[in-house]
Amino acid sequence: MSCVASVGTQRSAPGAPRVIVAGATGFTGALAAYLLWRHPDFELVGVTGRSEQGTPLQELYPRYRVPLAIEPLELERLEGIDAAIVAYPHAAAAPTVGALRDLGARVVDLSADFRLSALSDYERWYGEHPRPELMAQAVYGLTELYRSRIAGASIVANPGCYPTASLLALAPLARAGLIADVVIDAKQGISGAGRVFDETTHLSIAGENIVPYKVAAHRHTPEIEEQLRVLDPAHRELKVQFQAHLVPLDQGEIASCYVTTTRPIDAAELRALYADAYTGEPFIELSERPPGVLEVRETNFCRVFAAADEHTGKVVAFGSIDNLWKGTSSQALQNLNLMFGYPETRGLL
Amino acid sequence: MSCVASVGTQRSAPGAPRVIVAGATGFTGALAAYLLWRHPDFELVGVTGRSEQGTPLQELYPRYRVPLAIEPLELERLEGIDAAIVAYPHAAAAPTVGALRDLGARVVDLSADFRLSALSDYERWYGEHPRPELMAQAVYGLTELYRSRIAGASIVANPGCYPTASLLALAPLARAGLIADVVIDAKQGISGAGRVFDETTHLSIAGENIVPYKVAAHRHTPEIEEQLRVLDPAHRELKVQFQAHLVPLDQGEIASCYVTTTRPIDAAELRALYADAYTGEPFIELSERPPGVLEVRETNFCRVFAAADEHTGKVVAFGSIDNLWKGTSSQALQNLNLMFGYPETRGLL
Amino acid sequence: MSCVASVGTQRSAPGAPRVIVAGATGFTGALAAYLLWRHPDFELVGVTGRSEQGTPLQELYPRYRVPLAIEPLELERLEGIDAAIVAYPHAAAAPTVGALRDLGARVVDLSADFRLSALSDYERWYGEHPRPELMAQAVYGLTELYRSRIAGASIVANPGCYPTASLLALAPLARAGLIADVVIDAKQGISGAGRVFDETTHLSIAGENIVPYKVAAHRHTPEIEEQLRVLDPAHRELKVQFQAHLVPLDQGEIASCYVTTTRPIDAAELRALYADAYTGEPFIELSERPPGVLEVRETNFCRVFAAADEHTGKVVAFGSIDNLWKGTSSQALQNLNLMFGYPETRGLL
Amino acid sequence: MSCVASVGTQRSAPGAPRVIVAGATGFTGALAAYLLWRHPDFELVGVTGRSEQGTPLQELYPRYRVPLAIEPLELERLEGIDAAIVAYPHAAAAPTVGALRDLGARVVDLSADFRLSALSDYERWYGEHPRPELMAQAVYGLTELYRSRIAGASIVANPGCYPTASLLALAPLARAGLIADVVIDAKQGISGAGRVFDETTHLSIAGENIVPYKVAAHRHTPEIEEQLRVLDPAHRELKVQFQAHLVPLDQGEIASCYVTTTRPIDAAELRALYADAYTGEPFIELSERPPGVLEVRETNFCRVFAAADEHTGKVVAFGSIDNLWKGTSSQALQNLNLMFGYPETRGLL
């Protein structure tokens, strides 16, 4: 019996930038490859991985109909590629990012290796940095915040999914200098654990469960804190209380943010603040009710909702995304669109 | 706070056929509207419903970003529309299909009202037929079987989701006159129950459950039997044993078919039979292993797998689809593509 | 075909207290009936409801094998009952609680009608109180906090599930006067929505979703605030930021509590505080890692975990329960055990 | 912080039979240990495993509050035990079963090693048998069929979960010589895959999926065929078409059986046949509608429903169980109860 039908050749235009995905066997690399494959203006020329070499990506991920086979990463064969998405684990990514840069490729790195600007912050959470000299070249890739810098960047440090949801919920408050203290309680589907096979992901254990993890020690905290400091007009330092939970769905993530404000803010001002911040943003949807994650599943949208609590005086803000899409892989495409001069929404609507 | 961003205007070309969805508040009508909305060559000009009038479809179905508001169906305002998808309950559909035909629209009917060619069969399962004179105009809309007739049809009776999965699994055997007897055991996600709020769909009751329903009395049986008779070279009558089950996922359906054959058939012949039948089909994927429904979720693909069981002599064949997509709404678009001369895959890949 | 086998007669001892469940058609009333039915020392003599009269409870809830049929509540037939569990909606419960009290029955009320001590608090959230004169008779039924008062009470106001998980996580801190400010982010399975059939509970909508609800306006807040005030040595008033979310499982609930403390507290002191508070408690399990809700499913246990966050100085405390069991119905039995002089764990291990 | 509270000492009576579970780290062994631990008349004296030695079972399986630590199996320390449940993989079980027999223990074996009476059948599916001389001592442990033989057996071969559900659905027909041909389509929750960590069990892959497996080659087929032959009055050989599917829930299994009968049978006769077969059975519930698996979750019950299909002349019969309970571990306890002279329901209601 013949194998699964290929969806045929790519639809990319002649002369389209040539892109690879390094590390395409994991959930986010595979999705990035799929999004590139169906993108009208990029040509996906290779998918690499340490395992599963020779296996077509679409056998590993039947939903992602990409017929290219997993290959080893052989830099000598990559002369002339225009861009790469690197989906490696933290610390493992930096050397490959550097090698691809040396070949002239522009890189979107999905790992944490270039997200923090201070080397000491990196070392505290991840150990020695493999290529510290490249850190200055990297731009933090939360598209809505750094659009123009991303357009010209050679290395884009794609944000973590938790920081993406959290910062999009909080940015209007941060820019207005309104955050005195913040607790972020995040919930994520099991795909956030990745292609990892253990008790965390076994349906019989994870399926009727809610599990907090990494209590009082989450590596996404410094990334969020740095960005909130940059956004704050006075660049104040904040200590963010961040807590992640796994809940039994596949894809979806919400950051529930509880903000003690620096001064009282009422509903009307809050509304205006968010409207001003996000009007015209193609992928931010201000919702009129608390946003469920199903509303953004398999999209690059982030739904944001904020409310002033008259009882406590706090502001409650929610950011709802698909952790694999806007949280990771489709945001990488959004950034690549900017880097190559395409409309930001190309291939993503 | 401003409402959810609209995805903007439709992308349909000027002069594109103008289409409505009648009955867009249910799961399948809403999906059909969404697929039309994002289709490059149809213009969705209206979505109707008896309830929720005035509500934008995207508030009812946040995942389907269609800003059109639900309207009452007012035939006098529909002069000049080119086509309609009717997503009404069985028996309720026929009068509206007729009225839209009278306006000159070509109609894809998602109900069972025009699926059976014999009035007596219809009456047995559904009662009196509201517009029996139209039955002769209707073409059965299983695209892969009736492509050329569909292209010229004024009414297309879109198949049920169970018959779609079952017939695509069985057609190669039926055409070869190989089916002596068949048991079809089908499993479907909860979306198959539709936008119905009762014990069938409550997560606390349906979520950790497997429930057979309509035992020994399923209305999809005559539809399958008629098509198997048509496909059979000798037009033999078969009594099909069909049984449906609800299982706890959202979208997805598999028909597991157990065929007693009219003569022995070995693996090689079986392989050739299916390859001959489906080579070149854009939406049929012959798989090399039993197909999971996740592989086709939110696509118009049907995965088909067949095996000869040496132990029993039977053939086991599986058809795996998304019940809302290929099982209903995307197959309606596939048919509309044919009816208006577009490539069959337009807007569906 | 004969109907489902009854599990036979009750196993209760002769002379056991005679108990009814008023409102047994909902999730919590039905579970309470089941727990009474299998309890060795209570005799369940009736289950009442406005709907489904005449239907055996085990047809409505096949998992709960209670053959008694749903009856109307007829007070004149209830002479001589010893106790009742009332599972009515808020505001509807108080008149029935009162009527049952007039008959001499001791009552555990699952509604909010007697949970707040101040009439004004009740009126703010629920409107006029039907039987305010009974409020002074009621004891708040969080067993671990009010054991001796519950033993002698005529009306026990069973706590809400959110307050149960939250207060058990926070009580050791509250009693030590350590809570300066607290954010409670709670997640609950769909059974928390009850036997309600709408979009909240439809598997296709709720199944791959995470949904915050009642933002900045949750009726459980005053209940938590009152209890924290009572527990605090100085009876300070706290404004609690409480937020609930529905996540896609059946039963299970976790309250994640983020506490700004009145003074610094280190890990050792925190450990000692919780150990002192809960050593010997039969249903409190201090866990050594963040507690998943699966660990307590269908039990009366509450798992508690607390950690001091050196980075922020806050304390993070979790309380994990089954919302239908310890959150509601099994806690009602735990209270009934106390009220009738049985060991607290009877029928619950 | 102190560890999880132990539920205290076992409640078993002095002089209760002393039992071990060999292989308690898997799902079924762990559940068997839990059921023994809470059984009033057995004393669980040890739980063994190759991995996780030294870990209390309740840390590995928090829901099963058994404080005993996993130990290596050391036969010299097992002198004087009265019974054992062996939960080893197929082929690995027989040597341990034999060794425990040599110590005088009575054994319930959860593997397939002693389920088939013909050595050649075993060898075809599993390879060489490690202890073929013991096969004659073993009794097939489908309690409802072999009650008296089980009571006196030294080795009980606990049935597979698929044969349990299938045979309980089919036994009344088989005993009446009514089965001419049968197709069994079985669906099972993910716990059926066991404590295995791979794509089969990852929530992101299994969670929205329905997956047929082992097409035309399932090792449970000969077990079912042998038992149907034994039950048939004429001991006719049947070729059973058996097909298994994994569906996205934790525990639960249904066997949907499609029977071509040897002679016509109407609804009344069918009803009488099943009522005669199962009246008085404590764990068989004849249901009046198709049985959902939720109805038997975490119980030893099997729900059976059969209907005559007038259209096809076939009989459709369903057997619904919890695959880990009646399908495996609680049936093992049911058998142990018989072997030691206790009421069959002891510890199981």
Image (tube, coloured by chain):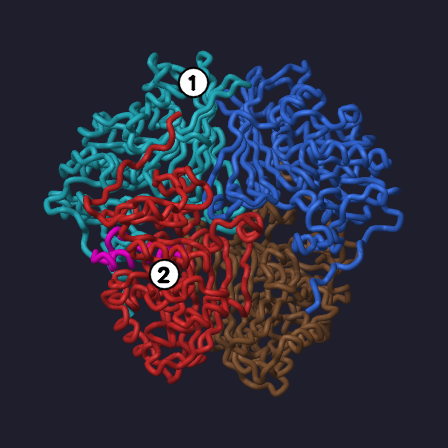
Chain colours: A blue, B brown, C cyan, D red
Q: In terms of secondary structure, where does tag 2 sit? A: loop
Residue at coordinates 52% horizontally, 33% vertically from top-left?
A213
**From mark 1 to mark 2, how far is it between C-alphas?**
50 Å
Task: State which quadrant residue A3 falls in.
Answer: bottom right
Dot 1: few (<14), some (14–19), or many (≥20) neighbours within 10 Å? few
Quadrant occupied by the N terminus of chain C:
bottom left
Q: Nearer the viewer, residue D349 or B324?
A: D349
What amino acid is found at the position of numbered circle 2 in the picture?
Answer: Asn
Residue depicted at x 33% and y 14%: C233
Image quadrant where one finds the C terminus of chain C: top left
Q: Is residue A268 or residue A282 the one in the foreground?
A: A282
* Residue at the image point whose x is 67% and y is 73% from the top: B271
Q: Is residue A311 visible?
A: no
> Label 1's element?
helix
Q: Are marks 1 and 2 on the same chain?
A: no
Residue A208 % position (x, y):
45, 45
Residue A256: numbered disc: none
Q: Chain of mark 2?
A: D
Q: Position of residue B138 (x, y in %)?
A: 63, 75
Position of B268 compared to D334: left or right?
Answer: right
Question: Which residue is under mark 1?
Answer: C268
User: Start and end of the magenta stretch?
Assistant: D321-349
Residue A153 in the image: state x and y as whole percent.
Answer: 81, 30
Q: Which residue is mark 2?
A: D158
Asked whether residue D114 appears in the rendered view, the answer is yes
Q: Amino acid at mark 1?
A: Ala
